[in-house]
Amino acid sequence: MRHYATELPMMTAVEQKKILLEVNDVSVAFQQRQVLHDVSLQIEAGEVVTIIGPNGAGKTTLVRVALGLLKPTSGTVRLDSTLKIGYLPQRFTVEPTLPIDVRRFLQLTGVRDLERLQSVLDEVGAGKLLDASLQGLSGGETQRVLLARALLRDPELLVLDEPAQGVDLHGQVDFFALIEKLRVRRGCSVLMISHDLHLVMAATDRVVCLNNHICCTGNPEVVTRNPAFIELFGEEATKALAIYTHDRDHRH
Amino acid sequence: MLDDFFLRALLGGILVAVVAAPFGVFVVWRRLAYFGDTLAHSALLGVALGYLLHLNLTAGVIVVCLLVACLLFFFQRQRTLAGDTVLGILSHSFLAVGLVVIAFFETVRIDLMGYLFGDILAVGRGDLVWMAVCGSISLVLLLLIWRPLLLISIHEDLARVEGVPVDLIKLSFVCLLALLVAVMMKIVGLILVTSLFVIPAATARKLVRTPETMALMAALFGVLAVGSGLIGSYQWDTPAGPSIVLSGAALFVVIYLLPVKRGA
């Protein structure tokens, strides 16, 4: 930690940060419904960006556009095809007739060395799952296995589409703590979606508050004081968040 | 005691079973079980066009089957309709077009039944060579796309994000499948081909834990079905193709009744 604390700011002061991904003035309409309206987003190397917004705000759509999985109705996306991305989709269900265990699933990345597979599973806290069937995993286990798979590819950017959905609160806290730990250790960027601010705010460099258009964006403290944010999420949520961030300041 | 035609049938059946197995597992995983039937209905148009344009009939069937494969691919890409619905639309439309085209030259009688139901007992030496060559090429090509196709079958978006050329791989797979069905259908009959794609793979599912062993087990069950079906048909003088399908189905029932824990 100390090493990063002294080295990183100097480095960033000198070097121009590399832009990994760029979405410019993107609009998406499904039939008549406008889901995204003139949205722009940039992800820089080493940055953690969290997209928050209510249901139907277009969070998943924005991520799918950014990843090239969905063609926008208008606007452009710049994504280096050599950029290594680790993607944790919102839903991951595998056809039940397809027999596959975690080992084989991880090996599909091209890494066959069992020791490496085991060590990456240990790294994400899923050390016991090497021989488990992919369909038999719980929600939390599935995320960890997907994360392990993403890490095997040495990603420069991790994209998490509400990966902790359906996992209990305790599990979610653990999972985001793990993401934060991995990010520091590996130095990759993270783009994640969350509708629970409390969990991800403290580990986020920049929040993008989305409600079909970008309401506000900035670092967590600034955004939570923005009237557009308060209007979208209500006083209650914002207060609860303040207590939480206060709490974090006092952790040792 | 065994005649030449019987040995040729056995060899032909084993060839089909072995080639069909690794394709069959993907057919099951990707829910394309009715692709074969759709191709069969379309084959009528292929035969008709072959007559009309004075082409080799097998060539006509192959061209139409490839066309169906491409249409299936493009419809699936729209993501507005489920695969089985697309197959239903293609299947009946092509059958209708085929019937209409045939009505234009009523003097020609087409042995459509021969195309659809073939006769494994009539397999000749040339057919065997043709099947072996086509089968080997298809298998090699399938092996080349095995890993990306497997990843696509597990999670298509994940594959796309990881840089797998998803569209190219999917199109290659349906075209290979169409080609294989078109070639084999003429020789051993459609029922035998489509059933050897689906039934052995479904039988193998219960006993395996990895995709590759499922393909190998499917090949084994396919060969068993061919062997026992042909011996049964020889013994009791029953039609060969249906006997093979029946023994495949019997194997499926036996394996599913066995008290073995599902291999996963």
Image (cartoon, grey):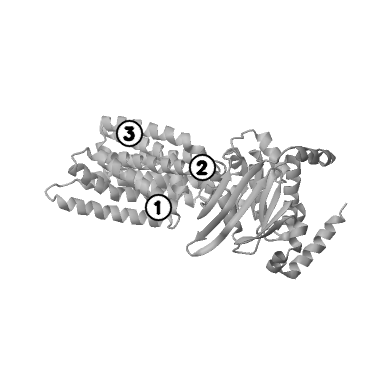
Which is more N-terminal, label 3 or label 1?
1
The answer to whether any part of residue A239 appears in the image is yes
In the picture of the structure, the residue carrying the numbered disc 1 is: B75
Task: For marks 2 and 1, give the CA distance.
Answer: 21 Å
Task: For marks 1 and 3, give the CA distance.
Answer: 30 Å
Question: Marks 1 and 3: which is nearer the front?
Answer: 1
User: Same chain, marks 3 and 2?
Assistant: yes
Chain letter of disc 3? B
* Quadrant in which residue B189 is drawn: top left
Q: Secondary structure at mark 3?
A: helix
In the picture of the structure, the residue carrying the numbered disc 3 is: B131
* Quadrant in which residue A52 is drawn: bottom right
Chain letter of disc 1? B
Where residue A22 sits: x, y (%)?
61, 47
At 53% from the left and 47% from the top, the residue drawn is B154
Where residue B200 sits: x, y (%)?
43, 44
Question: Marks 3 and 2: which is nearer the front?
Answer: 2
Which is more N-terminal, label 1 or label 2?
1
Residue B150 numbered tag: 2
